[in-house]
Image (cartoon, grey):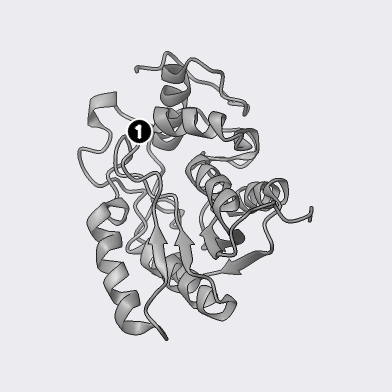
């Protein structure tokens, strides 16, 4: 791993690093503001090997102090999501106006609570005062664990259930659109070319699942090319 990123702050943080675009931008901000440690979760998702490659590459590029890959097998065993259950197909994205109108089959039940719990546990061990996560409420798939109220509630849990209750959950992107996230990523030199967003394939992005379509639409609106390869994609509504 490369040398740690330079920061003027003595603060330590743990950043949830999925390998996707949102977590990449979040990790870039965390590395600028704190001495950041990256945590990644393989949880039986279809593209877990590819996501791990991306997360590790982002951590190395940003010079995070440590990269901790964890395996969380309960979601694969429980099932109930197209991301972890091979009997449920990952659907192609519908019309732009339909995305986020209902909770899709790609929702992994209560996933972010498990991720945050592990990140907070590691933060206590490290003496870190922040946990960063790239949750986005706007312009997303409508996942209930990406809403501000979810993180406010989890903050209360940290206050009552940790040693001194002072660890802060930081969600710097939660009120931004995907297009705004791309622009912010370009401004802070986030390595977006290393990221992976596709739900279906680990070789080249499918271009038609909801995650790919949201990403392609955002890059189109930002008027910059998406730096990762796609199998196919048609016109992108913005």
Q: Which of 200/43 is in front?
A: 43
Q: Secondary structure at mark 1?
A: loop
Q: Identify whether 214 is placed above or below 77.
A: above
Q: Can you see residue 214?
A: no
Query: Where residue 159 sits: x, y (%)?
Result: 32, 77
Which residue has dot 1 on it? Answer: 177
- 112 vs 165, nearest the viewer: 165
Q: Quadrant of residue 98?
A: top left
Name the side, left or right, on which 162 lies relative to 50: left
Asked whether the viewer can see residue 98, the reply is yes
Direction front: furthest residue = 8
The number of discs equals 1
Pick whichever, 182 or 126, lies toward us.
126
**Residue 206 pos. (x, y %):** 53, 31
Q: Position of residue 193 (x, y in %)?
A: 64, 33
Residue found at the far bottom of this picture:
163
Residue at (27% x, 44% y) in the render? 142
Quarter of the view holding residue 68: bottom right
At x 49%, y 20%, the residue is: 233
Which quarter of the image is occupied by the C terminus?
top left
Q: Does residue 188 sit above or below 44 in this rendering? A: above
Residue 155 at x, y = what percent? 31, 68
- Residue at x 42%, y 86% (from the top left corner): 163
């Amino acid at each position: 791993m490369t040398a740690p990123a330079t920061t003027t702050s003595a603060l330590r943080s743990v950043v949830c690093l999925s390998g996707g675009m949102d977590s990449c931008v979040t990790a870039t901000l965390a590395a600028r503001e704190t001495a950041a440690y990256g945590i990644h979760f393989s949880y039986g998702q279809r593209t877990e090997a590819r996501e791990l490659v991306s997360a590790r590459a982002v951590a190395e590029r940003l010079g995070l102090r440590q990269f901790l890959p964890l395996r969380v097998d309960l979601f694969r065993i429980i099932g109930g999501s197209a991301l972890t259950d091979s009997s449920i197909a990952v659907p192609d994205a519908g019309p732009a106006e339909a995305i986020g109108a209902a909770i899709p089959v790609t929702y992994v039940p209560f996933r972010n609570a498990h991720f945050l719990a592990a990140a907070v546990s590691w933060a206590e061990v490290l003496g870190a005062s922040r946990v960063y996560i790239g949750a986005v409420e706007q312009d997303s798939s409508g996942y209930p664990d990406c809403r501000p109220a979810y993180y406010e509630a989890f903050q209360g849990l940290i206050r009552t259930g940790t040693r001194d209750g002072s660890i802060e959950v930081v969600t710097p992107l939660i009120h931004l659109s995907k297009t705004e996230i791309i622009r912010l990523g370009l401004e802070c030199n986030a390595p977006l070319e290393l990221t992976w967003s596709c739900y279906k394939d680990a070789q080249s992005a499918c271009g038609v699942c909801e995650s790919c379509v949201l990403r392609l639409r955002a890059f189109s609106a930002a008027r910059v090319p998406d730096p990762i390869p796609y199998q196919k994609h048609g016109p992108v509504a913005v």
